[in-house]
Image (tube, helix red, strand yellow):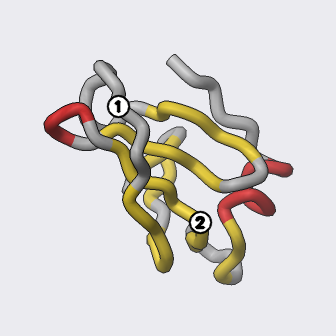
Amino acid sequence: MELGGETLKVFAARHTATATDKAPGSVVSAGKDGLEIACGGGKSVLITELQAPGRKRMSAAAYLVGHPVSIA
């Protein structure tokens, strides 16, 4: 997954019941639960664990503390 010019490895994610009209790959929400990304068909996925380049594996919430994400 690419976010803010960085390629992130995704280790844990789960399906959400959120319906969205955003384009696939767009950020739907970002917060203490993780990073919610729009998928095809109006669905979304919640990323809960990831790894930034040169960093340790961490929760998405911990990543967001140091890397604020704008929701477009």
Give the amino acid at mark 1. Ala
Position in image of residue 15 (x %, y %): 38, 59
- Give the mark nearest the N terminus, 1 or 2: 1
Question: Would you identify the image quadrant in which residue 62 lies?
Answer: bottom right
Which residue is tagged 1?
19
Front residue of 65 and 12: 12
Q: Residues within 10 Å of mark 2 (few under 14, many from 20)?
A: many
Determine whether, in the image, residue 59 is placed left or right of residue 10.
right
Disc 1 crowd rating (10 Å Cα; few below 14, some 14-19, many 20+) is: few
Q: State the residue lying farthest toward the left.
A: 41
Q: Quadrant of the N terminus?
A: bottom left
Image height of 47 relative to 30, above or below: below
The reply to whether dot 1 and dot 2 touch (C-beta < 8 Å) is no
Q: Is residue 44 left or right of residue 59?
A: left
56 up-or-down from 43: above or below = below
Q: CA distance from mark 1 to mark 2?
A: 19 Å
Residue 22, image x, y percentages: 32, 22
Badge 2 marks a residue whose secondary structure is strand
Residue at 59%, 66% in the rendered image: 48
Q: What residue is shown with label 2?
A: 48
